[in-house]
Amino acid sequence: MAPLAPLTPESYSDKPEPQALAIRAKSIVTLAGEDPARGARLFAPLKKIDNAVLIVRDGMVDEVRPWSASAAPAGALVRDLGAVCLAPACVNAHTHLELSHLAERTRWGKGFTAWLQSLISLLREAPDPQAAENACAHMAGTGTLYAGNITGSLPGGMLLADAACREAGLAVNHFCEWFGFGAPFADGVRPWPPRCREALEEDPFLAARCAPGGHGLYSTGPDILRAAKQDCARMGRIFSFHLAESPDETQLLTTGDGPLRQCYEQVVLPPDWQAPGLRPLAYAVKLGLLDAGTLAVHGTQLDAQEVEVLAASGAALCMCPRSNRNLGLGVPPVRDLLESGCLLCLGTDGLTSNRDLDVRQEAVWLRENLDVPPEALVRLMTINGAEALNMLQSGAGRLEPGSPADFCVLPEALTY
């Protein structure tokens, strides 16, 4: 559920303080005072206030406390949401908003390369602002108010996605994705991908919410990946890229052949390209891409030893399990990841590989199919996602005094 809009000044009457809003619910999980959770701390009991009320002033949390006849401040507008459990607003740490107009038009269930080929044939179409607006409005309506958006696939896609996020009231960080190979950058030149460069150079306020990123280890040149990672470290931004997403990626990087080689040869891969002869995680380590400022995405092909290496690096991993399932890629080694100490969060990927952008449904899928405890899932889709996107300082991920009054309604599968 999206937060209620702040009351307008006209509704304050003559009181010196803004009129309070009291939102009552069966229970509220606040995560107040918690840090992002890793390893065993993911499974710690969540502090829950039963028969609770969230007091809001001017769109910010004033207090969360048990309900009583005197709990609401004098003159407060009381809204009773009924038998629901509220939690901090969700964070969709990885999605592709500018491709929303391509929903249900790609090939699922036949592997990664078959899906990719079906997508490539559609990328000549201009993005649709209305589709992006609808996608963002749906996210906000399901209680996802923070997002990490991947952009750079289509001309004008970043501006379209950013406008749609602002219209829906979403806070968004954009990862400007490099796709392809090229020469190293000159000193002092920021490594923005071509489809984003002009807009970002003209709008420093937009650039402040953007970071250069890589598409993948097989589709972005190693010099570009290093330059983007170094720029993010210098500017204090998060660097993100797809990692160990498919068997096709692993085959291409280790042996240099397979369906992905056939798809990309003489189109993306340069004529002299040679496979590094390494699995994706090892290649990322060799390129120096993994540390506490990195958000890797997917990880379906990681083995147990690689999970330990990833956790030790300090990098975060965003899992998109329904997207992986839809494309026939398997699922990440979730149990190993949960126990490893890696910072984990959730994303939906985009509508080209998923049916909706409701990150709560990623958590429900993990709960129902892999029996992941709800305590861990609530943390993954809230406070951990905020940490992975560097949004904790803005108040995302918790419901505590002074934070934005942004909340979601937990699905029944995630309550306890």
Image (cartoon, rainbow, N blue to C red):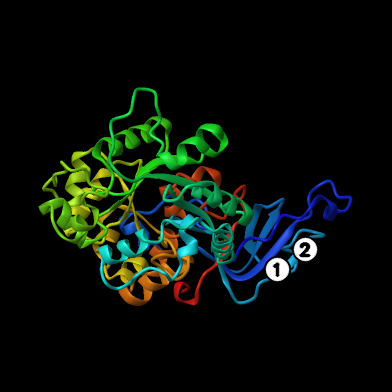
For the residue pair 170 and 218, the one nearer the viewer reads as: 218
- Residue extending farthest to the right is 14
Q: Quadrant of the N terminus?
A: bottom right
- Label 1–label 2 contact, CB within 8 A: no
Q: CA distance from mark 1 to mark 2?
A: 15 Å
Asked whether the viewer can see residue 34, the reply is no
- Percent x, y for residue 33? 50, 50
Label 1, secondary structure: give it.
loop
Question: Image quadrant of residue 73?
Answer: bottom right
Asked whether the viewer can see residue 187, the reply is yes
Q: Is residue 301 left or right of residue 353?
A: left
The vertical placement of 140 against 224, above or below, is: below
Q: Is residue 77 left or right of residue 371?
A: right
| Mark drawn on residue 77 | 2
Q: Residues within 10 Å of mark 2 (few under 14, many from 20)?
A: some
The vertical placement of 106 against 290, above or below, is: below
Question: Image quadrant of residue 50?
Answer: bottom right
**Three-letter code, disc 2:** Leu
| Mark drawn on residue 68 | 1
**Three-letter code, disc 1:** Ser
**What residue is shown at x 24% (from left), y 53% (from top)?**
264
**What residue is shown at x 82% (from left), y 60% (from top)?**
75
- Percent x, y for residue 295? 35, 48
Q: Residues within 10 Å of mark 1 (few under 14, many from 20)?
A: few
**What residue is shown at x 16% (from left), y 51% (from top)?**
253
| Mark drawn on residue 10 | none
Q: Nearer the viewer, mark 1 or mark 2?
A: 2
Label 2, secondary structure: give it.
strand
For the residue pair 118 and 347, the one nearer the viewer reads as: 118
- Residue extending farthest to the top is 187
- Percent x, y for residue 60? 66, 51
- Percent x, y for residue 226? 28, 35
